[in-house]
Amino acid sequence: MPQSVLAVVVARLLHGKHVMAAAVSHTWRRPLDAREQMILRLVVRSFIDTAGPVGSRTLTRRHPLGLSPASVRNTMSDLEALGYLRHPYTSAGRMPTELGYRAFVDDLMDLPELSTMEKRLLKAKLDRLMDDEDELFRESSRILSRMSSLLGVVLSPKISTGILDRIDVVPLPSPRVMIVISVRSRLVQTIIYETCVDIKRHDLDRIVLLLNERLAGLRLEEIRRTYEDRTRDLDDDKTGIVQLILRERSVLFNDRVQGRLSRGGTQQLLRQPEFKNTEEMRRLIKMIEDEGFVVQLFESQSPALEMGQAAVSIGSEINESTVSEYSVVTARYQLGETVGTVGVLGPMRMDYERAIALVEHMATLLNRPALSK
């Protein structure tokens, strides 16, 4: 193993900063020797920079390898036979395969890191928005895009993972009520329903008090599952609220897709060479505009072991055929008791070191595990 690659592996182990790969099974292949690792690393880097196939003469001209073009060409042929490189055309140089990118991310790239100046500027910019979460998420997605030339995505936390602070029921002009679900991390969900009962204030206050005594302090997903058992004896409710919540519990105590997604950088992404084709561009725009699809895509990626640590899904690892030519980098952040997701999407030929560094640092900036009520 080359000394530089060995240093990366050791540093990852010492700092606990390995990048978790999405679960994927490839046919067993023999370990790459030092020369193969060096050549594969250079080919991936060159292809990321230029978007063009990489030839042996290009590598020997640009890098002091101490190898002849013929030796490099033979090594590239071996890497192609092993499935790490491929020929886009008969007489062209090579480009990485999905397996080549995976090997690069897992073993060959440098430790992802932003500069001290970049970290300082990002923190200063986002600190000013901490009291306005909607704008914070929007600006975070835009920054991710600008600094990576990829699609930047921030998903606000899933309310179902939060702990209920209280339920409020607000009478509106008859025959409607507004049910307010407040979660400890200051997330609030409000839904208006029509009722067929003339609700008296003292009856409403009593039933709301009982519901809060039984449900406050539980996670919303647990309330959704156990609400019926916890309220079975409240059959003397004259307001109809207990039964209304029972009927609507899958909505009240669940996550809504609408409004959770902040994304930025469609135009940045479309400037990538992969989207010169009009049909590919149209397909990408259609996909990005589907809010439900984007939310599901980012939340379905295998999370890393630790909060704020990046997970990388490449090509077919994403388990979604419409994005099999893309890669997704995600990390989770914590807002009080709830968990959100931040990440980027782009072509497989993305700058993984840059993308991972940005996503991990953005997750760190958004992370606020202990919020005061």
Image (spheres, rainbow, N blue to C red):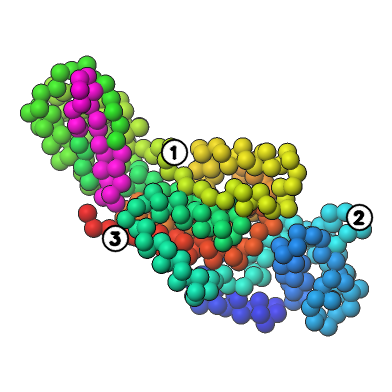
Amino acid carrying label 2: it is Thr
* Residue 363 on image: x %, y %: 45, 60
Amino acid carrying label 3: it is Ala
Q: Secondary structure at mark 1?
A: loop
Q: Earlier in the sequence, mark 3 or mark 2?
A: 2
Q: Earlier in the sequence, mark 3 or mark 1?
A: 1
Q: Which residue is more in the foreground, 289 or 243? A: 289
Q: Which residue is more in the foreground, 297 or 127? A: 127
Q: Earlier in the sequence, mark 1 or mark 2?
A: 2
Residue 198 on the magenta segment: no
Give the labeled residue for mark 1.
Answer: 257
Q: Which residue is more in the foreground, 222 or 124? A: 124
Q: Quadrant of the C terminus?
A: bottom left
Residue 175 on the magenta segment: yes
Task: Work out how far the residue at label 3 is from the one at label 2, CA to CA, in angstroms.
Answer: 58 Å
* Residue 364 on image: x %, y %: 43, 64
Amino acid carrying label 1: it is Val
User: Could you tell me if the residues under marks 3 and 2 are in contact, i.e. CB atoms within 8 Å?
Assistant: no
Which residue lies at the image location 35% right of the left edge and 58% below the top edge?
130
Which residue lies at the image location 82% right of the left edge and 73% below the top edge?
59
Label 2 packing within 10 angstroms: few (<14), some (14-19), many (20+): few
Looking at the rendering, the stretch of residues picked out in magenta corresponds to 169-189
Which residue lies at the image location 53% right of the left edge and 74% below the top edge?
115
Give the labeled residue for mark 2.
Answer: 90
